[in-house]
Image (cartoon, rainbow, N blue to C red):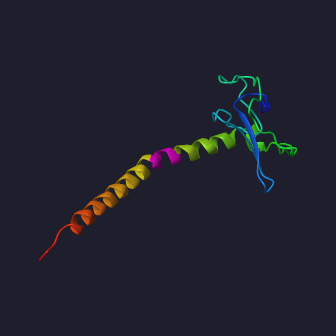
Amino acid sequence: MPMRTECKNFESRSYPNGDTVRKCNLDLAPDAPWRCPEECPKYERRLADAAWTHGSLVVSATPPEPESVADGSAAALLDAAEDILNAAGPSILAEIEAERQNQSRRGLRRLFRRGRTDD
């Protein structure tokens, strides 16, 4: 099934350099920008374009679908990459938190030193 541009979760954004991003905002279309899942559980037809800003430029056509989309290897590669990032996430967050705590402690030490006199 091609991307359902009428779905309220579909987004298309063009950038000044000419690149265009077409995606599902819920990340439910692993083959975006070429295909949506046949039976997407979150498909909802867009009812209105209230308060949206529409540009005057015409969005370029979707590029031709590569063979890796048709055979599923692109989705498998993206799933593997996502697994790697998800595995690294907790250790990265732990490092950032430890760094923040160290900075906070240093700041407290400086604060208490200012009021002390060693005479």
Residue 88 lies in the magenta-colored region: yes
Residue in the foreground of this view, choosing between 96 and 88: 96
The number of numbered discs placed on residues in the rendered structure image is 0
Residue 89 place in picture, x, y as percent? 46, 47
Going by the picture, which residue comes out furthest to the bottom? 119
Q: Is residue 77 left or right of residue 115?
A: right
Residue 6 place in picture, x, y as percent? 79, 28
Q: Quadrant of the N terminus?
A: top right
Residue in the foreground of this view, choosing between 26 and 84: 26
Residue 106 lies in the magenta-colored region: no
Q: Is residue 85 left or right of residue 54?
A: left
Q: Main secondary structure of the magenta part?
A: helix
The residue shown at (70%, 24%) is 43
Residue 54 place in picture, x, y as percent? 81, 39
Residue 42 place in picture, x, y as percent? 66, 24
Residue in the foreground of this view, choosing between 114 and 11: 114
- Image quarter of residue 63: top right
In the image, residue 42 above or below residue 21: above
Range of magenta residues: 84-89
In the image, residue 82 above or below residue 49: below
